Image (cartoon, rainbow, N blue to C red):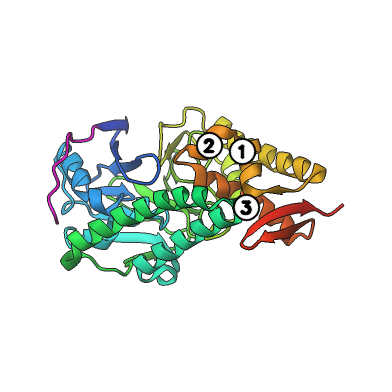
Amino acid sequence: MKVYKYDSIPDVTEVYPGIFKTVIPQPFYAPNNVYIINSPEPAIIDSGFIQNLGILQRALKKLGLSLHKIKHIFYTHNHVDHISAALTLKFYSNATFYGMKGMSQAVGDYISYLQSFQRAEKRLIYKAINDSNIRKKKFEKIQDGMNRFMKGYYENKEKVNRNLLIDLELVEGDIIDVGDREIGFLYTPGHNKWHLTPYIIGEGIYFTGDLILENISAIYAEVDGNLSDYHKSLDRLMKLPIKKLLPAHGSEIENPLKAIKLVSKTLSMLEKGVIRRLKIQDYDLAELVALSMGEKVINSPYYIVALGIIHSIVSKYINSGEVIIKEIEPPYEKYSWIK
């Protein structure tokens, strides 16, 4: 593993007896929370970005642990900020890797997968923006993240397996014993087709990955997300006796039920707003994002996320036949509600 110099070692905080959180930076959006279950068979939830695996190693040392001592790694889903460290982690850890059944086979060569994800993001920008200069600036931000990933790959190439390898594929109902705790898994698609929510049996602690964050998550219908599945997963969580929601980004969610309801309500409000506007006149995706989420989102790191959410809503009504695509200058398009 290439040794990087870091300004500081991230803090490791105990969020519940025997459960710790460390915050690992990554080049795309907000830093990732990696959760450490300090059991007789230590486990972590996700492992972060490939280039910052050394930071995780240093954080683990604060608990007297190391990558080599970790016995179980549970992956919530296959997005780059959560799982790309897995491509090299196999060379430094004997841990068992867990993920949703079918995920690793579907992903295969991770670099090819990431390139296809990047193309999907570019498709969203082409659909939304007709100004080539603005598009170019957005593309540069997307490419910057890919460049950082590839830098991490080539610097460690001799110890990176391009294929995403999962040792044990999980289905809902599987239980993994980590010594003094049992870990269960909910299949919670929507943000991602392969999204799992690990939880600690009998304690009401749920690790929600990107399904529930502080405000709203992302849905990439252009890639592997689904708005209908997202709502179904939210509806299911609302009915569970959840005491703690531990998200993959941001602070711990203080009121789990309230937070889940808020995400569901926010999505519903965005959907109603899109419908209302399209019933008045035609809009493109960029206009709908600005009107629905505010002008500030346009130049924020979350712009692609915002495009993905609104596009997922529009796609729902395209598929139902209530909205048609007006091809202005393909692939740039506008949307029209069928009167």
In the picture shown, does residue 227 fall above or below 113?
Answer: above
Q: Name the residue nearer the viewer: 315 or 261.
A: 315
Residue 16 located left or right of residue 155: right
Q: Are marks 2 and 1 in contact (CB under 8 Å)?
A: yes
Mark linked to residue 312 = 3
Tell me the kind of residue under disc 3.
Answer: Ser
Tell me where the magenta segment starts and ends, as one range.
1-11
- The percent position of residue 149, horizontal first and vertical second, equals 30, 56
Q: Which residue is mark 1?
A: 290
Callout 2 environment at 10 Å: few (<14), some (14 to 19), or many (20+)? some
Callout 3 environment at 10 Å: few (<14), some (14 to 19), or many (20+)? many
Q: Which residue is mark 2?
A: 297
Magenta stretch, main secondary structure class? loop
Q: Name the residue nearer the viewer: 235 or 180.
A: 235
Measure the alpha-carbon separation of dots 3 and 1: 15 Å
Measure the alpha-carbon separation of dots 3 and 2: 17 Å
Q: Does the image show residue 319?
A: yes
Q: Are marks 3 and 1 in contact (CB under 8 Å)?
A: no
In the picture shown, does residue 338 fall above or below 270?
Answer: below
172 part of magenta stretch = no
- The percent position of residue 87, horizontal first and vertical second, equals 27, 62
Q: Which quadrant is the N terminus positioned in?
A: bottom left
> What residue appears at the point 76 percent right and 48 percent down from the top-left corner?
282
Residue 181 located left or right of residue 134: left
Q: Earlier in the sequence, mark 2 or mark 1?
A: 1
